Image (cartoon, grey):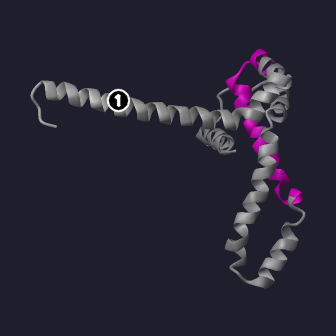
Amino acid sequence: MSRRMLTIAGILLLLVGGASAQAPSPEAMTTARKLMVTLKITDQYRALLPQLLLKLRPVVAQDRPEIERDYDAMTAPGAQIYAPFFATMVEQTAAVYAASFTLDELRQIEAFYSQPAGQKLLAQSDALAQASAQIGQNVSQKAADELKQRLIEALRQKGHKL
């Protein structure tokens, strides 16, 4: 999920950076909102906001049982508390997608990710990203070791003492 969180953070940074000069069409926004569901971004946001409430608990309650009890009672109906924030996150993210892609591109992306292969890619994206990163690290380390030995040998042949 770390890659997804980075993606979410990146999208939020784009949102903070400024909006598009031209507002996306209503049809592009509708398609982008649908894409948010297909890409499971809405699920990620639903999970993100309750985690925020859990992180705020010790800050607000300050290890005082009476405050913790009231805090828990106030945040139990969590969906009501963060529903406006959830809607804002989805709407603004959809706007980023709608501004970044044409309506036709949004439809093509939606069509791909709606199919079994697209859903499989989504389901395996974190594991694939981790495996790819590990391969990159392993090969880079091997390359560094081998290149180091080659360079040392070449420098020794030139008379350098290493």
Query: Residue 8: percent from the left, percent from the top?
Result: 68, 42
Q: Looking at this view, name the residue that lies furthest to the top.
A: 104
Is disc 1 surrounded by few (<14), some (14 to 19) or many (20+) residues within 10 Å? few
Which quadrant of the structure image shows residue 151? top left
Residue plotted at (69% across, 41% down): 4
Which quadrant of the structure image shows residue 29? top right
In this picture, is 60 found above or below 85? below
76 or 152, nearer to the observer: 152
Which three-letter amino acid code belongs to the residue tagged 1? Answer: Glu
Q: Looking at this view, name the residue that lies furthest to the left.
A: 159
Residue plotted at (88% across, 56% down): 79
Residue 135 inside the magenta-drawn segment: no
111 or 34, nearer to the observer: 111
Quadrant of the frame with the C terminus: top left
In this picture, is 138 found above or below 103? below
Query: Residue 136: percent from the left, percent from the top?
Result: 51, 32
Which quadrant of the structure image shows residue 124? top right
Residue plotted at (88% across, 66% down): 76
149 or 42, nearer to the observer: 149
Instruction: Report the predominant secondary structure element of the magenta stretch.
Output: helix
Residue 102 inside the magenta-drawn segment: yes
Query: Residue 9: percent from the left, percent from the top?
Result: 64, 44
Query: Residue 78: percent from the left, percent from the top?
Result: 86, 61
Label 1 sits on residue:
146
Residue plotted at (88% across, 73% down): 73
Would residue 131 appear left or right of 26 to someone viewing this image?
A: left
Regarding residue 23, the answer to whether it shows in the image is no
Regarding residue 13, the answer to whether it shows in the image is yes
* Magenta-drawn segment: 79-107
Quadrant of the frame with the N terminus: top right
